[in-house]
Amino acid sequence: MRIPGLSDPHVHMREPGATHKEDWASGTAAALAGGFTRVLAMPNTDPPVVDAATLNIAKKFAANGARCDYGLYLGAGPNNPSLAARLADQAVGLKLYLDQTYGPLRLEEISLWNAHMQAWPATRPLVVHAEGRTMAAAILVAALADRPLHIAHVSTREEILLVRAAKQRGFKVTCEVTPQHLFLTAADLPGSRGEVRPRLASQADVDALWENLDVIDCFATDHAPHTAAEKAAENPPPGFPGLETALPLLLNSVHTGQLTLEDLVQRMDQNVRRIFNLPAQPETWVEVDLEHRYTLTAREMHSKAGWMPFEGWAVFGAVRQVVLRGKTVFMDGQVLAQPGSGQQIA
């Protein structure tokens, strides 16, 4: 079965600053193995991407390492609303961290949210990490600024119902959900390896996400790799690798009838391109085997993380071949694309 090349609007490549976890070459190898021909990378690197100098650093590493197409986010900081807005045409969006996460970019003051939303061009995507009450506040501030808002990794019943209510009232809101929040609960992955943001929730929250599938615009991995040793530490960093497991997990849901293939393609291709104004990728497609049954294991991962939260899960649905702009870049477990062959989304 042939499907379009997929786009992931939410990945962390860890380069610069933490290449022992991931770099552009390894992360985009994982992307291709997972059926993604395009990834949008978050700005909470070291240094974070907040101005022209750090954006140029990020561009350099991405251009040298990326095996698939890519876009770069700018990060909203306390001192860069005007500066970020001037760089908007060089980024795929502006990311505002309004709740605690990995990295130093959290914005505490609502006045800063407003300054960024007012300054950022209305034609360019605004993406927020905002949970619970913070999400409600972010939706209001974006509405007052008359800006469309994309909410990252919605994870709970109250959040998805809030997004539903906002959409019903005409607010310019879209959202994404990750596989970990669709398939895991806090009880499924206790201990340090379960540390993630947003946190894993309850079965009732998982059920609510599936029951409100029509409200979910995108499936995004939030690929956030850390090593197994880091995850086993006393204070583990939050985040899971996800680029290589997202499509198999969702194809398995197609196999079980929980999802249709059209649902999947809409949320991993069509809606992502629409929300983030992404150009077409000509002669690009993914060949998937919907009937192939196998077990997910970190031993076969291309990511540097070396572990996965879905270790040992049996799934139906495997990526066989990926073609990007007419060239085979992945075939039967082997990544063929060379580092630096990906193209930046301007």
Image (cartoon, rainbow, N blue to C red):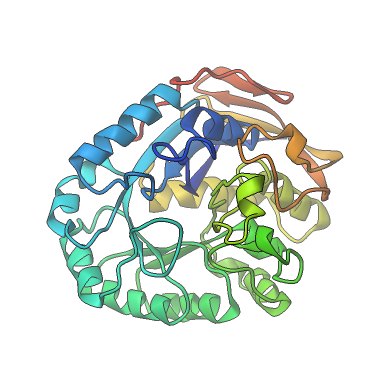
Q: Nearer the viewer, residue 48 or 185?
A: 48
Q: Quadrant of the N terminus?
A: top right
Total label count? 0
Does 326 appear above or below 3?
above
Residue at 57% across, 47% down = 226
Residue at 53% across, 37% down = 22
Residue at 39% across, 30% down = 62
Q: Position of residue 230 (x, y in %)?
A: 60, 50
Q: Position of residue 344 (x, y in %)?
A: 36, 31
Residue 340 found in image quarter: top left
Left or right of 173? Residue 121 is left
Q: Nearer the viewer, residue 231 or 248?
A: 231
Q: Position of residue 24 (x, y in %)?
A: 47, 31
Q: Position of residue 81 (x, y in %)?
A: 17, 59
Q: Nearer the viewer, residue 48 or 3?
A: 48
Left or right of 95? Residue 87 is left
Does 238 appear above or below 161?
above
Question: Is any part of residue 27 visible from this angle?
Answer: yes
Q: Residue furthest front?
A: 234
Q: Quadrant of the C terminus?
A: top left
Left or right of 98? Residue 336 is right
Question: Is any part of residue 280 visible from this angle?
Answer: no
Residue at 60% across, 47% down = 265
Residue 190 found in image quarter: bottom right
Left or right of 78? Residue 205 is right
